[in-house]
Image (spheres, rainbow, N blue to C red):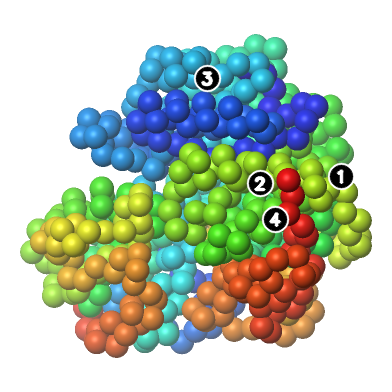
Amino acid sequence: MGPIAREERRWQTRMGFSDPSEMEAGLRAVSMSSVPTLGTITLDSFTRTNQHDLARQAVREGRRLNGYPLVALGAERTRELVDRVSGDGFPVQVRHGSARPYDIFEVMVAAGLTATEGGPVSYCLPYGRVPLRVSFAEWERSVRMLVAAVPGGGVHLESFGGCMLGQLCPPDLLIALTVLEGIFFRSLGARDVSLSYAQQTDDLQDREALRALRALAGEYLGDIDWHVVVYTYMGLFPTTPSGAMHLLADSAILTADAGCERMIVKTAAEAHRIPTVRENVEALQLADRAARVVGNVRSPVVDEGIYERALTLVTKTLEGGASPAEAMLRAFRSGRLDVPYCLHPDNANRCRSGVDDRGRLVWFDTGSMPIPAARGSRPTLTSSSLLDMLSFVRRRFDGQAAEAGGLTGVGQAPGEPSTGRMARGVSDAS
Amino acid sequence: MLGTECLPLDSAVDPVPTGSVDDPTVVLATISSDAHSWNLVVLQLLLEEAGHTVCNLGPCTPPADLIAACLDYTPALIVLSSVNGHGLLELPEVVRTLRRQPRLGGGILVAGGKLTTSGGLSATEIGSLRADGVDRVFTDGDTLASFSRFLRGVPVGGGQAAR
């Protein structure tokens, strides 16, 4: 099982089937996609919430789950299928969303898998009711076990902090959270980590964010191996195939231009259902092609203070505790870190964010966080205004797809500001 | 109260006129394996705009918490929203358990979202959920507008805290 990102940029899917032969077939199809990639085993929701009996029951009854039930199926069964598809050039990563991942990590290691993702904050606050302190305790125990079980620094841990709820979180906080989780992993002995960033509403803002992220990673994780993984937009996805493909292509170009080493794709099916293997493979190929054809675009460099704000959040957090874990726990308790729209009882939820009239993510109110809010009027939050913000990217790309239909330049959905995000020439690439 | 932690949507920062969450007229929740919360955030706002006070139990709702909240508040409306494709796997059990409670009160119980991994529901599957005790099923094809129309027929107020 080789390291996740070396030499060449890799494009990656999500993928999880509850039937092991389907899972194996999916992994094989990805490995044969002739695109630099790696395998993914995405776990189902019962497994993520430690309800392994429900997963077992579903498997017994032949009912389809929304992912691979790793713990229910067990290490031996999993090792068999992984050995048949993996190799030096095709590492396999386990993706899940668990605040309490010990069982998952245990079976993972026994199955010969050494790469995974998540984090005590990023897989706790967005996703349920496990107390943050419990999540930190179990993540600490789990990461230590993983590091000890895989000799020679072979474990890879990816922080999901650059995504959180997937939408409406200003980049400075996402960057701070993923860097802080990287620091947490490093403090427990991890020597090969990745930090994440999910594509947001504005391409220039995303480029500034990725520069800031890479700078902070270099400063705080410079003595270990690290890389950055970009996620194609994680919010409400365009419903038209053309809109979806353009958004995916944009994320690939962003990843390449920003010098990032890996990207997790979305597919044209995303708005409707879980994608098929074929849709996933097509997405990989589109991403790879888009980055090759259009790469090296000289976009204007914008500096709106993302690096400074992210740095403030990281330093003010770390000042507050003897260990990264204690520091982060204190920061959330006091609201010095505060994730917008996050319902978790341990999140202060005193801040407010949104999409401004330039299409960028801004803070309307930073609550107790040590960073300033944007100036300007603060809109009232209603179900309509929230839906408008949540559907902002979808409407823009579906609207552009309806208007442009080709190479004639950047289309605009009525009333939407242009952000120059439309990919150029992808549909004509050979 | 057993873990019935209602999650107010930041009413201190963006005041939306609501009653006290001590006496909610709606209990809003999801199934235990569903970690999504945007649907719950939007639905809470929609319900509040229709005049209700909402107890939002948040993502990955433990069934015990849902049942305890419904018995405590005897709400006029129970809304179960799920989008992870496991709805049809989990709803029958939790709905049947709710319906078995003699002190549940006369509240309406609705469920909706993306309830299967393929997104859609067959007529048989909808019928089965109705038989389990769901008064109305909002499938993938239903819009928030149809839910809003439905809400106009639901009385605001009328939930009484259990003595």
**Camera-side residue of A387 and A50:** A387
| Labels 1 & 2 near each other (Cβ < 8 A) | no
> Secondary structure beneath disc 2?
helix
Q: Is residue A5 visible?
A: yes
| Labels 4 & 2 near each other (Cβ < 8 A) | no
**Camera-side residue of A41 and A45:** A41
Compute the Cα span from label 4 to label 2. 9 Å
The amino acid beneath tag 3 is: Val
On screen, residue A293 above or below A85 = below
Of the 4 image quadrants, the one containing the C terminus of chain B is: bottom left
Q: Is residue A365 visible?
A: no
The amino acid beneath tag 1 is: Ala
Q: Return the disc, 4 or 3, that comes first in the chain's sequence.
A: 3
Q: Return the disc, 3 or 2, that comes first in the chain's sequence.
A: 3
Residue A41, percent from left and from top: 50, 32
Instruction: Tell me the crowding category of disc 1: few under 14, some 14 to 19, or many 20 or more residues within 10 angstroms, Cα based.
Output: some
Residue under pointer 4: A427
> Secondary structure beneath disc 3?
helix
Do badges 3 and 2 share one subunit? Answer: yes
Residue under pointer 1: A215
